[in-house]
Image (tube, grey):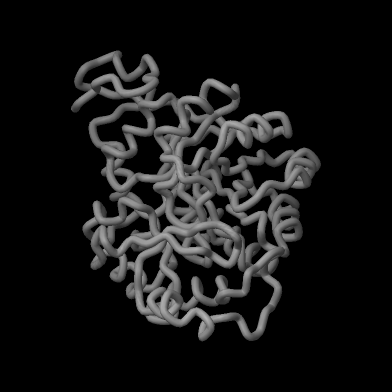
Amino acid sequence: MNTKKEGILPSFFFEKEQTLNLPVLKIADLKPVYPIIQGGMAIRISTGKLAGTVAKCGGIGLIAASGMSSEELLEEMDVARKIAGPDGIVGINIMVAASNFELITEVAMENKIDLVVAGAGFSRRLFSLGKKYNVPVVPIVSSKKAAIVSQKSGAAAIVVEGFEAGGHLGTEVSTLELIPEIVKSVNIPVIGAGGVGDQEDFLKILRYGVSGVQIATMFALTKESNAHENWKNHILNANEKDMVIIDSPVGFPGRSINNKFLEKFKNNPIELATKKCIGCLKHCSKKFCLIQALENARLGNIDEGLVFSGKYFYKIKKILSVKEVFDILLKDIEKL
């Protein structure tokens, strides 16, 4: 296996030429077996079954709480805990841009969720809740400034997400460009995210000195993912030229797989403009209903839905189990 120096490399990558050791990820008192976090993919792509299975396999599983009611979230947390077992680590991912962001976050914390990962915005209130309930808060950031502010606000760790990630994007800078400066700027764990389609991508991010890696699309395309088979097959049957960046109603660019819905949005946007709004987002352009579009696709209605995906989706060739994804990522690697 190639261990050629690339960027900022931690010393453990040079211990043996043939054997690589994984760093230890520690977020507050949480210490997963492997430094792998499953990205929280809404709407209802990553629910209790996926998050619980990832946790059972030794990573950190995240339930995508955005778009869920309090009751639904509690049900999914219960599912995840039963699968994960007593030692499994289960958190939620929540969009700060969601109208019920604070309510859902507090419900999760009150019911002893292990950690909260938050993206699509920044909220100081989140850190107050984390302190109140003694739950680690992990913001998703895309700049050195946001990383430093997060640490000063009380973040237990940060996820640094680059332009290669799927879904909503906070930067046009690649993950590997962002990580080195941020790693040097904070003294809390840094988790790299965006651009993992195979083991090579996973190791490449680790070689830049992070404590862990967040992976989404590989887990979205597993048997345990809550996405419809049509959703999974749409990604598996796409090629590189089908990747597009859209202007999401939430106010961020979004990385998606092209389909009839996006062609319609491009050619006749007025037709998709939101007619009835349930106010799920704090700020929304109403160009189309984001929640409905994501849910349509997740349920298998691809022609009327939005399919978010990471940049390197095309490296994934078939639907695997979560265990098989771990086997791919960890092949020939030992824990430190």
- Give x and y (percent) for residue 53: 44, 53
Q: Quadrant of residue 12?
A: top left
- Give x and y (percent) for residue 160: 51, 38
Q: Residue at x 60, y 60 (%)?
A: 251
- As drawn, 17 above or below 224: above
Residue 75 at least partly seen: no
Q: Residue at x 75, y 60 (%)?
A: 103
Q: Quadrant of residue 222?
A: bottom left
- Give x and y (percent) for residue 221: 34, 60
Q: Nearer the viewer, residue 302 or 136?
A: 302
Q: Nearer the viewer, residue 231 or 8?
A: 8
Split into 4 quadrants, where in the image is the C terminus? top left
Q: Nearer the viewer, residue 240 or 103?
A: 240
- As drawn, 316 above or below 152: below
Left or right for 277, reference 142: right
Q: Residue at x 36, y 26 (%)?
A: 207
Split into 4 quadrants, where in the image is the N terminus? top left
Q: Residue at x 63, y 36 (%)?
A: 146
